[in-house]
């Protein structure tokens, strides 16, 4: 039965009837063996059994959020912390096969925390060319009395060919508020003056402080213990894939990569060993058919945190402007 929630809690839930419906949309490795297509599917299986059934070089972009080197309970399936050498052995069991599913000009992103990031870098460098390390601020989390609060995570960005890969920086620029606007001849220089404030489109760095971790009041939230924000995944997908490209996630979890790929008009393929997580993913995919919004990304622009009022004001301004332009165009016909 679904957990009891507070009235304003928007965390995703599944009724027994919904779960029975959603599991019918989930693909198994046996279905793949019998010819089921892999595109736009959630595959419920162990990744090692699925990889031989997927064609080589089918993915334009791969996003990996593997178990970190922590003891964690994933809905009854426990991952135990181990030595650094043992963790690297774990990575080497599947990473080479995953990389084989990437196109020659494709890109790969792999997530980690401070404890496992060195292992991720070392093992990933054995297979690919590392281009950069993104560090993002995960403001959610417990404080610590004898240590610094753990509030940062890494994402390693790697490609097969450093001279041939796709990267669209224009798609991931950040809209930031201008605190001390600079003018030339009385006019804004590299910024825009609007009714909701002064803003500048800035090039993205490899440090992201604009991400909100999913929590109970957000409709994207689930009970998955390590769920990534849709906004975070949207940046990776927009930067390193085109509309219509294939995005592959071998550790899908609650479905965020597939959901964001669908919202951004990409194809997707995700593998997840936990059946309930697969059902969550399928419900989120069904919801994404009607609702393509991504919190923090509006009208093709990434916004800073706590700017919802400005986003709404800007959206209204653009609606009025488009209506005025439309009326003007119609008038000019007479």
Image: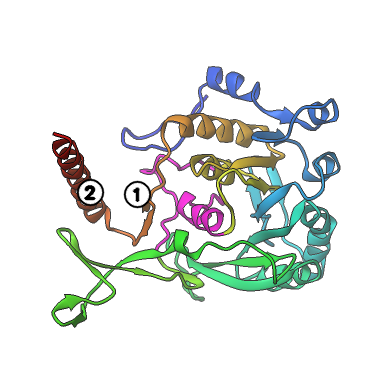
- Magenta residues, dominant SS class: loop
The residue segment tinted magenta is 210-239
Q: Nearer the viewer, residue 294 or 113?
A: 294
Please give the residue where the numbered disc 1 appears in the rendered image. Answer: 299
User: Does residue 216 show up magenta in the picture?
Assistant: yes
Q: Nearer the viewer, residue 286 or 21?
A: 286
Helix, strand or loop at mark 2: helix
Eyeballing the image, is 35 above or below 191?
A: above
Eyeballing the image, is 152 above or below 46?
A: below
Numbered-mark total: 2
User: Does residue 234 show up magenta in the picture?
Assistant: yes
Eyeballing the image, is 200 above or below 103?
A: below
Helix, strand or loop at mark 1: loop
Tell me if 305 is positioned left or right of 165 in this view: left
Q: Residue at x 79, y 26 (%)?
A: 31
Q: Residue at x 35, y 50 (%)?
A: 298
Residue 214, position in %: x, y? 44, 49
Tell me if 192 is positioned left or right of 128 in this view: left
Contact between labelled residues 1 and 2, with CB atoms less than 8 Å apart: yes
């Amino acid at each position: 039965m679904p957990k009891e929630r507070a009235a304003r809690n928007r965390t995703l839930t599944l009724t027994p009837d919904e779960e029975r419906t959603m599991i019918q949309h989930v693909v198994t490795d046996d279905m793949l063996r019998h010819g089921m297509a892999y595109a736009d599917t959630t595959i419920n299986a162990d990744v090692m059994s699925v990889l031989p059934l997927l064609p080589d070089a089918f993915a334009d972009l791969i996003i990996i959020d593997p178990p970190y080197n922590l003891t964690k309970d994933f809905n009854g399936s426990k991952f135990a912390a181990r030595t650094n050498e043992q963790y690297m052995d774990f990575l080497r069991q599947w990473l080479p096969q995953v990389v084989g599913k990437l196109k020659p000009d494709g890109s790969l992103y792999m997530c980690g925390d401070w404890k496992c990031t060195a292992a991720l870098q070392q093992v990933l460098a054995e297979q690919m060319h590392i281009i950069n390390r993104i560090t993002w601020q995960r403001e959610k989390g417990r404080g610590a009395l004898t240590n610094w609060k753990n509030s940062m995570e890494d994402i390693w960005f790697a490609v097969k060919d450093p001279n041939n890969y796709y990267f669209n920086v224009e798609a991931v620029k950040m809209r930031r508020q201008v605190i001390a606007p600079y003018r030339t001849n009385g006019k804004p220089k590299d910024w825009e003056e609007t009714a909701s404030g002064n803003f500048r489109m800035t090039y993205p760095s490899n440090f992201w402080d604009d991400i909100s971790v999913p929590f109970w009041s957000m409709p994207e939230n689930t009970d998955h213990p390590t769920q990534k924000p849709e906004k975070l995944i949207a940046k990776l997908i927009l930067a390193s894939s085109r509309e219509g490209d294939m995005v592959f996630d071998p550790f899908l979890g609650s479905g965020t990569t597939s959901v964001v790929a669908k919202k951004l008009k990409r194809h997707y393929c995700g593998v997840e060993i936990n059946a309930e997580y697969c059902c969550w993913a399928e419900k989120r995919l069904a919801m994404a058919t009607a609702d393509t919004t991504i919190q923090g990304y509006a009208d093709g622009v990434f916004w800073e945190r706590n700017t919802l009022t400005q986003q709404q004001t800007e959206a209204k301004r653009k609606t009025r402007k488009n209506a005025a332009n439309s009326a003007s165009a119609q008038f000019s016909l007479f």
